[in-house]
Amino acid sequence: IYDSTKRRCFVTGNAFDSVVYLNVSNFAHPNITAYYQDSDYLSGARGIVYSETDEVVFVAAYGSSRFTVLDVSSNGITLKNSVQLTKAYGPTSLAHDSVNGIVYVACFSSDAIVYIDVTDLNNLEERFLLQESSVLHGISDIKFDRFNSRLYTASKNGNAVAAIDVLNRTKSSTLLAHSVVDSSYLSGVTGLTFKTNLGNDLPGLTAIVVGCSDGDMGTLLQVVD
């Protein structure tokens, strides 16, 4: 994850249960400023997002099913807080709604999404959002679209991409009708990115690009409301 303001990157080390702080102020010669390693709080560290406001990174620890907060405010990395996930397990990816102070957690092993209120970093609360095995089977990546208050998800084992309305989390979330399951063009989908509001000629249009490990291909999807 990249912090453009301070020109630094934070990288998870899955095999070493770690997060590495890279100084990239000189792109030709990046250097490691600090790292944090912990076999419990960062076991199988995978997903990571950054909060510029709080100067912390949120990490999904797949091996221990933990959600961990690390303080990166002073050219180092220290443990801020951590919570054991109990409503779902096997977290792989995170998405940050910085306006509402919410981090969404995609849980590969549970075919589920939970979310955590991070407005108070000393008091983290996990809440269940959605479990849907048909389109979240082996959910591998998740992105938050602030413009439309949606989550876009990629599910490796389900060969699926879905859009989930999270405008009102107090009610049962509904998978939007334009979720796609396709074993040919979405085979082993592992990651995604998106772009909303594609200029004056295409106002409001959202396009999603996904990478498919099993099909050795990239696929372009258009979200149609």
Image (cartoon, grey):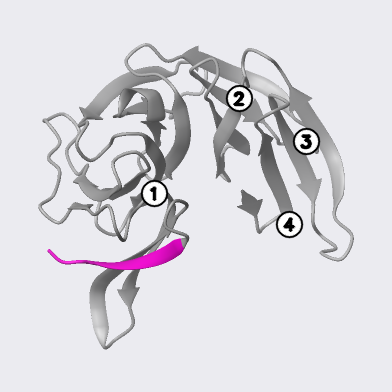
**Numbered circle sitting on residue 44:** 2
- The spot of residue 65 in percent (x, y) is 48, 17
Counting from the top left corner in percent of width and height, residue 74 is at: 78, 35
Marks 1 and 4, how far apart in space?
A: 22 Å
Q: Residue at x 42, y 15 (%)?
A: 85
Q: Report the front residue among 225 and 57.
A: 225
Crowding at label 4, few (<14), some or many (≥20) Cα neighbours within 10 Å?
few
User: Of the numbered discs in the image, which one, if any, rests on residue 135?
Assistant: none
Front-most of 117 and 85? Answer: 85
Read off the residue under disc 4.
7
Discs 4, 2 touching: Cβ within 8 Å: no
Pair 1/4: label in front: 1
Mark 2–mark 1 distance (CA, rounded to whole Å)? 20 Å
- Which residue in the protein does label 1 denote? 143
Q: Is 104 placed above or below 98 here?
A: above
User: Which label sits in the foreground, 4 or 2?
Assistant: 2
Report the residue marked by disc 3.
74
Residue drawn at (22%, 29%), measured in percent from left and top?
A: 130
Residue type (three-letter) at the residue carrying disc 2: Gly
Q: Secondary structure at mark 3?
A: loop
Work out whether residue 222 or residue 73 is closer to the camera in this orientation and state it. 222
Label 4 is placed on what type of residue?
Answer: Arg
* Mark 3 vs 2, N-terminal side: 2
In reply to whether residue 218 is colored magenta, the answer given is yes
Give the residue furthest to the bottom.
Answer: 201
Magenta run includes residue 25: no
Foreground disc of the pair 2, 1: 2
How busy is the neighbourhood of tag 2: few (under 14 within 10 Å), some, or many (20 plus)? Answer: many
